Amino acid sequence: MKRYYSLSSLLIALPLLALTSCDNMSAPKSQSTALSQNIPQDDTSLNRSVSDALQRDSLYARGDITVASQRGQVRLSGSVASIQDKNRATEIANKVEGVTKVSNNLEIVTPAKAN
């Protein structure tokens, strides 16, 4: 009789244990969906992230750069002093998490020569 209770308890406990452990192993639905679809940040956060990255590289000190984004696609506009600065801005923006494409519309404006 004792053996019957032990076996029946075990048969009930094992499936419950398996169900709860499987549920704990998976990521929350919202997190796993976002990771699998690579959903970009909202536009405001992405603009801020790209602008912050450009400021850390001091590109803002060498130019006037405006950042705009829509669904992960970033558009850089304004002016910089050299082709190297323009290319560097694209590299920096591409490295920001959530950026899927960069359109670099920066103009190269050389500083006026002093008389």
Image (tube, rainbow, N blue to C red):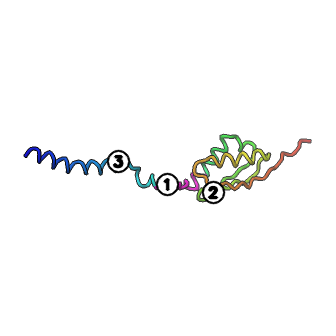
Question: Disc 3 and disc 2: Cα gap in Å?
Answer: 35 Å
* Kind of residue indicated by mark 3: Asn
- x, y percent for residue 51: 64, 47
Question: Disc 1 and disc 3: Cα gap in Å?
Answer: 19 Å
* Element type where label 1 sits in the image: helix
Q: Which of marks 1 and 3 is nearer the N terminus?
A: 3
What range is drawn magenta here? Answer: 33-46
Q: Circle 1 sits on which residue?
A: 36
User: Which numbered circle lies on residue 24?
Assistant: 3
* Element type where label 2 sits in the image: strand
Q: Circle 2 sits on which residue?
A: 73
* Kind of residue indicated by mark 2: Gln
Position of 69 with respect to 26 (left or right) is right
Mark 1, other Cα within 10 Å: few <14 / some 14–19 / many ≥20: few
* Element type where label 3 sits in the image: helix
- x, y percent for residue 9: 17, 48
Which is more foreground, mark 3 or mark 2? 3
Which residue occupies 72% across, 54% down? Answer: 104
Q: Do the residues labelled 1 and 3 touch (CB within 8 Å)?
A: no
- Residue 84 is covered by the magenta coloring: no
Q: Earlier in the sequence, mark 2 or mark 1?
A: 1
- Residue 35 is covered by the magenta coloring: yes
Position of 4 with respect to 61 (left or right) is left
